[in-house]
Each structure stands twice: as structure tokens, then as C-alpha cells.
Image (spheres, grey):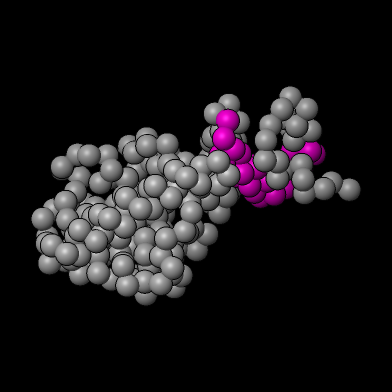
């Protein structure tokens, strides 16, 4: 009996690769095969080693290219790649994948199978890319986002802090202040976003974000 561990590895090696490909070959159902690949690929993106991350990117790319009709796995792979490239500061690549997810959701009239935040993450990628001609598009994405989907506190904070910063860059001062105040009013808004030895970096980034929001709120 196959154990789930074969497609939930947190690291990679020649032996792991051989075992993974062996079990993958024995998986007949293309839906399962695509699902196993996108699950494994996503887990490897969280590894600290670049070569392991590259394997994750490769697996997610295989899902997209080899199983185009397995829409659930493909759209998950697209968004995971967007998240990865956003974290790596490859903002144009991130935007490319988020645009695909946003287009898919519009075509399906549903956000099922996604984080429901792809358009907000696209707005973040556009803003952080540093091109002035993309700022209006980012603003529209934020303003058109259905806020009733924001059930979790983390998501509410993500939306309000992002909106505050985008409005601030566009000199929409009243809106920027309103969003910043709303973000700061949320309880337990800041949590570590990195694991292990990157905790200090996470705390530094969190402090920087809070200072920026307080400045906007006080303006």
C-alpha cells in the first residue's frame, strides 16, 4: 500500500526523486497524478534550499503543461507559482500567474479551488513591481474586490493594509487613511510570516509595516 509520504516530502534527493517518479508512474488516474504533483511541488517551494525550490517549480510546471484539463490542480499550481515568485520578488512572473487565476475565476464565476485572494495578490505584485502605469490597475482590483469574502482576520488585514499602501502611493489620502485606521484596528493583526531562523526577519518586516500604517493613519 502506498503511503502519502511519497508525495508529501519536505526536501529532495536522488532517492526521493526515484521513489516519487516510481509511484507517480503507477498512478493511473490523471486527476490523482496531477493532484499528487501539485501537492508535492507546493511543499518543496517552502524549502530553504534553492535547488529544492527549483524541483517544486518544475513539478508545478509539469502539472500545468502535462495535465491542462485537470483544472483544479492546474489552478492551484498557477496560484502557488504566483505566491512563490511574489515571495522571491519576481513581480512580473508573479503577476503573470495571478492574472491567469483571476481570469479563470471570472470565467467560472467562482473562486472555488483558489485562495479567493488572487486579485489582491495581483494588485500587490503590480504595485511592488514599481511601474507607475500599473498603479491604477492595482487600485481597481482592490476597489472591485468583494470584501464579503474576507472572513478570516488575516485576510481582512491583508486587504486593508494593501489598500492603504496603494491609495497612499496614488495620493488618495482620505482613502489611504481610512484603510490604515481599519487595518490598525484589527486585533492580533501581525503574525510571523516566515519559519525557523527567518523569524527575526519576519518581525522586522512586521514592524516596518506597522510603522508605515501608523504614518498613513496619522497623516
Residue sticking out furthest to the right: 1
- Indicate the quadrant where residue 183 lies: bottom left
Q: Nearer the viewer, residue 178 or 73?
A: 178
Percent position of residue 216, x then y:
19, 60
- Indicate the quadrant where residue 174 lies: bottom left
Percent position of residue 103, x then y:
37, 53
The vertical placement of 189 against 4, above or below, is below
Q: Nearer the viewer, residue 130 or 215?
A: 215
Residue at screen point 13% across, 62% down: 219
Say whether residue 190 is left or right of residue 76: left
Residue at screen point 42% across, 60% down: 190
Q: Nearer the viewer, residue 171 or 217?
A: 217
The vertical placement of 23 against 184, above or below, is above
Residue at screen point 74% across, 35% down: 20
Label tally: 0
Say whether residue 1 is left or right of residue 79: right
Percent position of residue 46, x then y:
57, 42
**Residue 38 highlighted magenta (yes or no):** yes
State which region is magenta.
Answer: 23-49
The vertical placement of 111 against 104, above or below, is below
The vertical placement of 58 against 166, above or below, is above
- Indicate the quadrant where residue 19 lies: top right
Percent position of residue 94, x then y:
38, 41
Residue at screen point 25% across, 65% down: 180
What predominant SS class does the magenta segment belong to?
helix
**Residue 198 highlighted magenta (yes or no):** no
Say whether residue 164 is left or right of residue 2: left
Q: Can residue 210 be seen by looking at this rendering?
A: yes
Q: Can residue 102 be seen by looking at this rendering?
A: no
Amino acid at each position: 500500500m502506498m503511503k502519502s509520504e511519497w508525495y508529501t516530502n519536505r526536501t529532495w534527493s536522488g532517492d526521493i526523486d526515484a521513489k516519487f517518479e516510481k509511484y507517480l508512474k503507477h498512478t493511473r488516474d490523471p486527476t490523482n497524478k496531477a493532484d499528487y504533483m501539485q501537492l508535492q511541488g507546493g511543499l518543496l517551494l517552502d524549502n530553504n534550499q534553492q535547488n529544492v525550490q527549483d524541483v517544486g517549480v518544475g513539478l508545478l510546471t509539469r502539472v500545468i503543461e502535462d495535465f491542462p484539463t485537470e483544472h483544479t490542480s492546474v489552478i492551484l499550481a498557477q496560484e502557488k507559482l504566483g505566491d512563490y515568485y511574489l515571495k522571491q520578488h519576481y513581480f512580473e512572473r508573479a503577476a503573470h500567474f495571478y492574472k491567469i487565476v483571476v481570469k479563470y475565476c471570472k470565467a467560472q464565476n467562482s473562486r472555488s479551488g483558489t485562495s479567493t485572494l488572487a486579485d489582491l495578490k495581483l494588485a500587490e505584485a503590480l504595485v511592488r513591481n514599481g511601474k507607475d502605469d500599473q498603479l491604477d490597475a492595482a487600485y481597481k482590483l482592490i476597489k472591485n474586490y468583494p470584501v464579503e469574502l474576507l472572513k478570516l482576520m488575516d485576510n481582512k488585514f491583508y486587504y486593508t493594509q494593501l489598500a492603504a499602501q496603494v491609495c497612499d502611493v496614488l495620493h488618495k489620502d482620505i482613502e489611504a487613511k481610512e484603510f490604515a485606521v481599519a487595518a490598525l484596528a484589527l486585533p492580533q493583526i501581525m503574525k510571523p510570516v516566515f519559519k525557523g531562523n527567518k523569524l527575526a526577519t519576519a518581525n522586522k518586516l512586521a514592524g516596518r509595516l506597522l510603522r508605515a500604517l501608523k504614518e498613513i493613519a496619522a497623516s
